[in-house]
Amino acid sequence: MEFVLFLSKIDKEIIELINKSNNSIEENTSLCRLDKKFVGFYKRKEKSIIICTENAKKLGGYKKDKIYDNHKTKIYIRRALRHEATHLVQSCNNNKPTGSIKNIEDKIHTTKLKALNSSVKISGTFEKELEAYVMEDKPRILKRILKSYCL
């Protein structure tokens, strides 16, 4: 899977935990063609995270010859993995937010508010999406709650 090239050490550890939790990760499935702005999905019934690497590369301005210089693409892919892994944790928590971050509404970065509102239109659950967007930038907490709720 190509998206692994863009991950940090802690993200690779998150993948190991996802696999141990009997969930899978797929890349560039037909869901990714719904809209080029989507870089990830969690299919709860199938217990599968989808990473849309091709969409992330387009959004991030990927340059083929500079794999290590594609900072924006790395960010899109890492955040997609963490976001969807948060939904996986929520699924392990009876499909509810974990509440692991206090004063969560104060933690959302203003640049993510538009994306948050778009996600809520699709999923219909503000609290779960809010937690997933905040968790994109908190891989250590995500790793801890993934262990706690899903293993």
Image (spheres, rainbow, N blue to C red):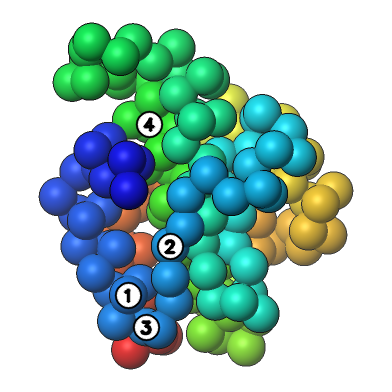
Crowd tier of the residue under label 3, counting other residues whose Cα lies within 10 Å: few below 14, some 14–19, many 20 or above? some
Task: From the viewer's side, name the closer residue of 119 and 65.
Answer: 65
Task: From the viewer's side, name the closer residue of 34 and 92.
Answer: 34
Local SS, label 1: helix
Specify the amino acid type for callout 1: Asn
Check if mark 1's residue and mark 2's residue have beta carbons within 8 Å: yes
Q: Which is in the foreground here, disc 4 or disc 2?
A: 2
**Among the 4 quarters of the image, the one containing residue 97:** bottom right
Local SS, label 3: loop
First of labels 1, 4 by sequence position: 1
Check if mark 3's residue and mark 1's residue have beta carbons within 8 Å: yes
- Quickly name the residue at label 4: 75
Q: CA distance from mark 1 to mark 2?
A: 8 Å
Local SS, label 4: helix
First of labels 4, 3 by sequence position: 3
- Quickly name the residue at label 1: 19
Local SS, label 2: strand
